[in-house]
Amino acid sequence: MKRITLLISVLGVASLACTVLPSPASPVPPPTAPPAPTLEAPTVVSNIPRNGFSLPDNLVDLYNRVNPGVVTIYTFAAPHPNTIPLGQGSGFVIDTEGHIVTNQHVVDGAEAIEVDFPSGFKAWATLVGTDPDSDLAVLRVDAPPEELIPIPLGDSDQVQVGEFVVAIGNPFGLSGSMTVGVVSAIGRVLQSEREAPGGGSFSAGDLIQTDAAINPGNSGGPLLNLQGQVIGVNRAISTESFTVSGSASNSGVGFAVPVNILRRVVPALIQSGGYNYPYLGITSLGDGSLNLRQLEFLELPSRAIGVYVTCVVNGGPADRAGIRGAGACGSPDTSAGGDLIIAIDGQSISTFSDLISYLVTEANVGELVTLTVLRDGEVVDFPLTLEPRP
């Protein structure tokens, strides 16, 4: 069975048993919270090689420019004298104020966080904020200016399937490792790191799929285009392969949080420690579920595409707007009678991925949106006001 595996690396006792680390007992946060940064506008550049393009030369230059801004992150469960890290991941510098982006699951539950720079400089980090829905976290370190080399951010809306991409991180603790691949797909959906009320999980959408080799320890590291701009944050792999120690290994199917979600989430994490996602209050069949047999069973036209609503959460935005689900929430049975969402704000929706991507990249809490649904053979519009995820 394939498994979606988060990429934090859990370190064995033997490998670090003789390492002496400074005490994590008292990391000192900054005296006042800095204002939320204004992340620079992306520079729209082609990521497609042209005639005369020398891939090896460009990769050497890219690595030399970008790697100084990629860090290794160690997490600890208890203060000194317990010097053995719980786990290890990756991260990268985003500004000269000392802010570092990584995955939320890398630092989840940590009592102390160490950040190691490629130069050898080490510092204790303060956790600024986390977002389990996007699996992003922001740290802050007190470091000399020469250590803080921000990596420029790109524009994930410009990413195309087939483009070359580069991952830099710390797989299996091998700091500064670089791998190359292509964008395999865009708009993928994974489960959020946050549970939904009543069981199950929310969805994290618009992810980039890549075949660039990423492994445990790559979590939180940058996925880059060939201009050295961050287009995603490496998050997870789908794999059937495991090492003798039980760690997941690369299968050529990796997922990265797109940088345009980072642009929305990170300023809010720095300013307030959290981020609110728009919420509809529905569950639906997953992508690829609407095969011909499903359509016939659900009494839908053979050409119908969209998001089939299996249940509507009582009292949620969709419920108040009049959206109809096929049955009761929590029921394992799927029956006919639910609405098929075919558009939001006039934008056609083919899959659940499309709907989630629109909500997380285009919509905001408190906005009025219009869902267009197919109900009993008729196309009907339902306006509703988006609320924050509970």
Image: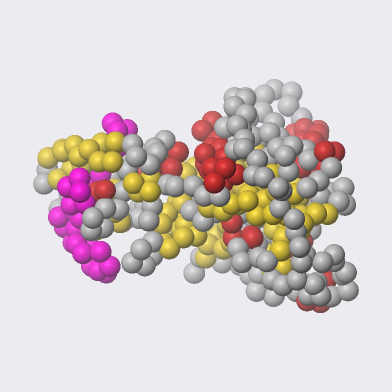
Residue at image position (83%, 54%) is: 122
Magenta stretch containing residue 329, yes or no? yes
**Extent of the magenta region:** 319-347
Residue at image position (25%, 64%) is: 329
Name the spot of residue 239 as percent of width and height, x first: 57, 63
Left/right placement of residue 273 relative to residue 383 reads right
Magenta stretch containing residue 363, yes or no? no
Left/right placement of residue 32 relative to residue 382 reads right
Q: In which quarter of the image is residue 271?
A: top right
Residue at image position (75%, 46%) is: 70
Decide if residue 155 is in sight here: yes
Q: Is the magenta stretch mostly helix, strand or loop?
A: loop
Name the spot of residue 36 as percent of width and height, x first: 60, 38
Left/right placement of residue 18 relative to residue 10 reads right
Left/right placement of residue 131 relative to residue 333 reads right
Name the spot of residue 368 as percent of width and height, x first: 29, 36
Name the spot of residue 233 as percent of width and height, x first: 61, 47
Decide if residue 350 is in sight here: no
